[in-house]
Image (cartoon, rainbow, N blue to C red):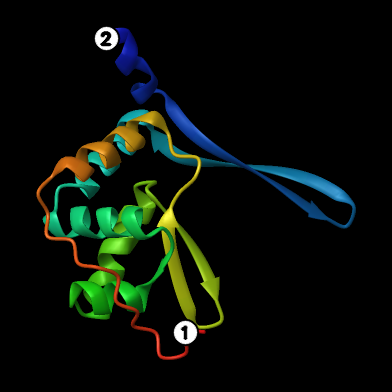
């Protein structure tokens, strides 16, 4: 049991390769310890609204923020706050197209987050059907 938790206590870094004037530079950004990442992930699902948003996105693949707003009958600022938390916790991927923001489940998703999504699918949550909210949707 303890050995399976050891990866959560190690430091996690993100490496970024930047090319500038024919020179490559590697930047090392400290993200936190595995424990920090674990706690952020668990904390992100400690809210029924975020569970509903995660399940809604998981069931509908990629959705625009306005679709979430229209379908879940929530204001945009509240949705954006929850989406930011879920994205920072490693669940979501953001794609921007002009003025629209589209969210989907990040892929590939690690086993821990996959198991969380699976457990959320078993919860009795009132998840509405997708109701398109974008005025310029083509």
- Determine whether 11 is above or below 53 in the image: above
Q: Earlier in the sequence, mark 2 or mark 1?
A: 2
Marks 2 and 1, how far apart at CA: 50 Å
Q: Secondary structure at mark 1?
A: loop
- Determine whether 50 is above or below 111 in the image: below
Q: In the rendering, which numbered label is found on residue 2?
A: 2
Report which residue position mark 1 lands on. 137
Q: In the rendering, which numbered label is found on residue 30?
A: none
- Determine whether 12 is above or below 58 in the image: above
Residue 39 in view here:
no
* Residue with the most extreme front position: 129
Residue beneath the point at 24% across and 49% down: 44
Residue beneath the point at 27% across and 59% down: 56
Q: Where does residue 101 sit, x and y in percent of width and height?
A: 45, 73
Which of the 4 image quarters holds residue 20? bottom right
Q: Secondary structure at mark 2?
A: helix
* Residue with the most extreme bottom position: 135
Q: Where does residue 19 sit, x and y in percent of width and height?
A: 80, 52
- Determine whether 41 is above or below 64 in the image: above
Q: Where does residue 21 sit, x and y in percent of width and height?
A: 88, 57
Residue beneath the point at 26% across and 63% down: 82
């Amino acid at each position: 049991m303890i050995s399976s938790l050891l990866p959560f206590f190690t430091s996690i870094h993100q490496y970024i390769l930047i090319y500038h004037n024919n020179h490559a530079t590697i930047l090392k950004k400290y993200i936190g310890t595995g424990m920090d990442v674990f706690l952020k992930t668990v904390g992100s699902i400690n809210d029924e609204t975020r569970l509903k948003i995660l399940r809604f996105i998981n069931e509908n693949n990629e959705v625009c923020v306005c679709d979430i707003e229209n379908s879940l009958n929530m204001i945009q600022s509240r949705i954006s706050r929850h989406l930011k938390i879920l994205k920072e916790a490693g669940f979501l991927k953001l794609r921007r197209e002009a003025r629209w923001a589209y969210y989907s489940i990040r892929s590939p998703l690690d086993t821990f987050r996959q198991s969380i999504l699976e457990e959320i699918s078993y919860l009795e949550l009132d998840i509405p059907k997708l109701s398109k909210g974008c005025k310029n949707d083509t």
